[in-house]
Image (cartoon, grey):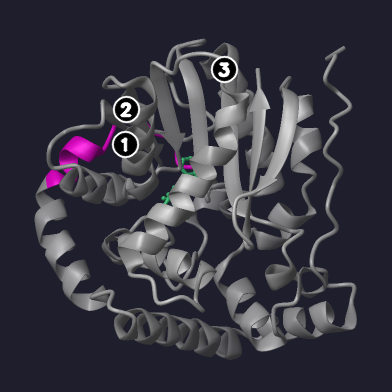
C-alpha cells in the first residue's frame, strides 16, 4: 500500500465546455462530428493562429521555412531504430493531419509556444522572448520548493523542439552553478531534428527518440523529470503509463513536474464557446486531460508530497516526489 495514496490536492471539475453532458458541451461535440465543419474549423484555427502570431512579431512562416531547411539533414540522426509509436500518437493534432509526425508541426512548434506565452500576458506589451522567459521562470519557481538536493541529471519528456528543455538547462545551470546534464525526449523525429538545430552549441546531453512511457533509459538515473505541456496530448491510460515510467526513472527523492492547462483557471473555465470549439477541434485528448485526477494518478504511480501550483493564470504545475 502506497503511504501517499491520499493526495492533499483535490481533483478539479472539468470546464463546462469540455463536458459533453452540458448543453454547450453537447452542441460543440455535435458540431465537431460533422467532418466538413470540423475541417473548416481546423483551417480557421490555423489561419487565426498564424495571423495573430505574425501581428505580434513572431515570423511564423519565414522561421518555419528556415528551420525545415536546417533540420531535414538531421532527421536520420534523430530517428531511433525499433521505436513503437503508440496508435493514439498518430491522431490528428493541432492543425496537422499527421499530428506531431510531420515537418510542418515541428517547424511551427517554436512559433506556437511563443504564441502560447504571449497569450498568457496578452494585455501587456511583452516581446515573445520576454513572455516565454516569464512563463518558464514561473514553472521552474513552482518546482524549486520540492527539490531537496542538487539536480545532476534532468530529463524533459515531450520536449518537442526543445524550448522548455533549453530553458530548464539555463535554470538548472544557474541553480547548481555548474553544467547540469539535461536531456530531452520526444516521439517525433522531426521535432527532435528541429531541437538539434535550436541547440546548435550542443548544450543538451541527449535528444532521445522514444515514447515517454517506454523510454529505454536506466532505472533510478534521473533527479528531475519535467513534462511541459505534454499531458493534454495524452489519453488517460498513456498518462498513467508515463507516470509509472517516470517513477521508474527517478532516483529516490527525485521530482516529477508536469505543467499544463489549469482546469481551475478562470480564463480556461470561462472560455467563449467559439474559442472552445476551435480548441477542442485541434486537441483529441483534451477531454481526457481535464477529466483525469492527476494528483490521484501521481499517487497511484507511487509519488508523494504532491503539490499543485498555478504558475500563471492559465497553467498549473503538479509537482511530486518519488
Ligand atoms: C505541446 S508539445 C510540448 C511542448 C514542449 N514541451 C514545450 O515546453 O514547449 C507536446 C510534445 O509531446 C510529444 N509527445 C506526445 N506524446 C508523447 C509520448 N507518449 N512520448 C513522448 N513524447 C510525446 C509530442 O511529440 C510533442 O512534441
Q: Is residue 10 magenta?
A: no
Q: Which residue occupies 38% across, 71% down? A: 126
Above or below, 30 relative to 150: below
- Quadrant for the N terminus in the image: top right
Residue 292 location (% of width, % of height): 77, 48
Mark 1 and 2 residues: CB-CB less than 8 Å, in contact? yes
Is the CB of the residue bearing disc 1 within 8 angstroms of ligand 1?
no
- Which of pointers 3 and 2 lies earlier in the amino acid sequence? 2
Q: Is residue 86 visible?
A: no
Q: Residues within 10 Å of mark 2 (few under 14, many from 20)?
A: some
Instruction: Identify the disc placed on residue 140.
Output: none
Q: Is residue 5 visible?
A: yes
Contact between marks 3 and 2 (CB within 8 A): the answer is no
Task: Choose mark 3 or mark 2, whichever is in front.
Answer: 2
- Neighbour tally class for label 1: few under 14, some 14-19, many 20 plus, Cα within 10 Å: some
* Badge 2 element: helix
Assess whether residue 76 is covered by the magenta stretch: yes
Extent of the magenta region: 74-85
In the image shown, does 219 or 79 lie closer to the viewer? 219
268 on left or right of 55: right
C-alpha gap between disc 3 and disc 1: 19 Å
Q: CA distance from mark 3 to mark 2?
A: 18 Å
- Nearest to the eye among marks 3 and 1: give it: 1
Q: How many marks?
A: 3
Residue 48, by quadrant, is bottom left
Residue nearest the viewer, comparing 109 with 97: 109
Q: Which mark is residue 254?
A: 3
Report, in whole angstroms, how far the alpha carbon at label 1 lies from the one at label 2: 5 Å
Q: Would you say 13 lies left or right of 124 here?
A: right
Q: Position of residue 94 (x, y in %)?
A: 48, 68
> Which residue is under mark 1?
170
Amino acid at each position: 500500500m502506497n503511504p501517499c495514496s491520499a493526495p492533499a490536492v483535490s481533483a478539479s471539475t472539468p470546464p463546462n465546455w469540455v463536458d459533453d453532458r452540458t448543453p454547450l458541451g453537447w452542441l460543440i461535440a455535435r458540431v465537431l462530428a460533422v467532418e466538413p465543419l470540423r475541417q473548416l474549423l481546423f483551417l480557421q484555427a490555423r489561419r487565426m493562429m498564424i495571423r495573430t502570431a505574425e501581428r505580434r512579431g513572431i515570423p511564423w512562416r519565414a522561421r518555419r521555412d528556415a528551420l525545415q531547411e536546417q533540420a531535414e539533414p538531421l532527421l536520420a540522426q534523430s530517428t531511433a531504430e525499433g521505436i513503437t509509436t503508440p496508435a493514439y500518437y498518430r491522431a490528428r493534432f493541432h492543425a496537422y493531419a499527421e499530428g506531431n509526425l510531420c515537418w510542418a508541426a515541428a517547424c511551427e512548434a517554436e512559433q506556437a509556444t511563443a504564441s502560447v506565452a504571449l497569450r498568457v500576458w496578452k494585455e501587456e506589451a511583452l516581446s515573445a522572448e520576454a513572455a516565454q522567459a516569464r512563463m518558464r521562470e514561473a514553472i521552474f519557481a513552482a518546482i524549486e520548493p520540492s527539490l531537496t538536493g542538487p539536480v545532476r541529471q534532468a530529463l524533459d519528456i515531450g520536449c518537442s523542439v526543445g524550448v522548455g528543455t533549453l530553458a530548464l538547462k539555463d535554470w538548472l545551470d544557474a541553480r547548481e552553478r555548474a553544467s547540469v546534464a539535461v536531456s530531452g525526449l520526444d516521439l517525433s523525429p522531426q521535432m527532435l531534428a528541429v531541437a538539434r538545430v535550436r541547440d546548435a552549441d550542443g548544450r543538451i546531453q541527449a535528444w532521445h527518440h522514444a515514447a515517454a512511457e517506454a523510454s529505454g533509459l536506466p532505472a533510478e538515473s534521473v533527479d528531475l523529470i519535467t513534462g511541459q505541456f505534454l499531458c493534454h496530448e495524452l489519453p488517460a491510460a498513456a498518462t498513467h503509463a508515463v507516470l509509472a515510467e517516470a517513477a521508474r526513472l527517478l532516483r529516490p527523492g527525485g521530482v516529477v513536474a508536469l505543467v499544463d492547462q489549469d482546469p481551475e483557471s478562470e480564463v480556461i473555465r470561462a472560455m467563449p464557446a467559439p474559442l472552445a470549439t476551435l480548441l477542442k477541434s485541434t486537441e483529441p485528448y483534451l477531454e481526457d486531460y481535464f477529466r483525469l485526477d492527476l494528483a490521484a494518478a501521481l499517487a497511484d504511480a507511487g509519488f508523494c508530497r504532491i503539490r499543485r501550483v498555478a504558475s500563471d493564470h492559465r497553467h498549473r504545475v503538479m509537482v511530486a516526489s518519488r
